[in-house]
Image (cartoon, rainbow, N blue to C red):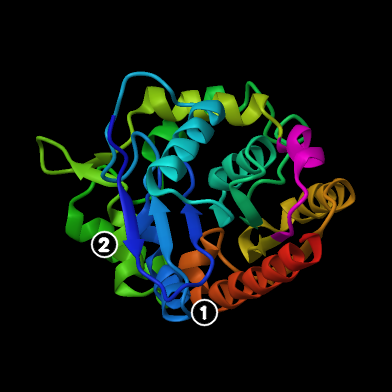
Amino acid sequence: MTLNVRHRPGRGGRPFLLLHGLASNARMWDDVARRLADAGHPVYAIDTRGHGDSDVPEQGYDNEAAVADLAAVCRELRLTGALLAGHSWGGMVAVRFASVHPDLAAGLALVDGGWINHTDTPLRIPTWQKDVEKIANGVPGTTGVTVHTARERIRTLHPHWSKDAVEAMLADTVEGPDGLLVQRLPLKHRLSILNSMWNDSPARWYPGIAVPVLMLIALPSYASALGDWVRKWVTEAESAIAHVDSRWYVGADHNLHADQPERVAADLLELARNADRSALERS
């Protein structure tokens, strides 16, 4: 199996490993990755198996396999002491990775993910299992339509997104035989990952994390009803993680890296400085 990695060289800074969310792809990080590389950090954005330009094997769509794949990428690229930034599901993968492979991670950024407890949520199993149609459709308005229509709908939903971000979201789909878009990641694999997300709470991995952790939390205006749940989960994570800092993005979209790339990049660069100070203190 081959995994695709989008690489931007740096100038000797600590490397960043960027992880996308479920049914997303590495290109969603481009606007942030460009800023990190300009600041001197080599950047590696990974398409997890079945996503983006990576291979689509029949098995291995769960958190454990994603962590193993990420460790293999680090070995192949000879990366140690990297800064991990995981968006949404990627945050869950990053939490488990940092706990299982402490030598490979020097800092952790959880970008609107990695702190949600799916066993303690208004969206409990089997709710998601009954919502297969919604899961199959992916982002509203981007499947079952032409590329042109999907592009215009993304631009309407996110008028301030860059052209690269719009095209990145569009890359989550492929054109079917009828010329209409379908989700790139097959439904059975999406459901497998969702099952892993529900059964592998990130809280079980918090005690193993000793590096600095930065949580970037979106509070979108359209999801105000979830605000109390979000604050509860964040508070629990803050209590369990040894070294943690939280940043709230009020009114922001779940895709923080596309929605506010300049602010996200600035926060990640601060994490890099904190990780360097922490490494010096331990040496």
Residue 237 picture location, percent across and down: 81, 48
Left/right of residue 133 with respect to residue 198 in the rendered view: left
- Kind of residue at disc 1: Glu
Task: Give the residue at x 10% y 37%.
Answer: 178
Quadrant for the N terminus, please: top left
Residue 212 falls within the magenta-colored stretch: yes
Residue 7 picture location, percent across and down: 34, 60
Residue 136 picture location, percent across and down: 39, 33
- The kind of secondary structure element at disc 1 is helix
Q: CA distance from mark 2 to mark 1?
A: 23 Å
Quadrant in which residue 133 is drawn: top left
The residue carrying pointer 1 sits among few (fewer than 14), some (14 to 19) or many (20 or more) residues within 10 Å by Cα, namely some
Instruction: Choose between 135 and 47: the one closer to the eye.
Output: 47
Q: Which residues are magenta?
A: 202-214
The answer to whether 281 is drawn above or below residue 98 in the figure is below
- In the rendered structure, which disc, 2 or 1, sits on the residue that comes first in sequence? 2
Left/right of residue 40 with respect to residue 256 in the rendered view: left
Task: Give the residue at x 38% y 66%.
Answer: 30
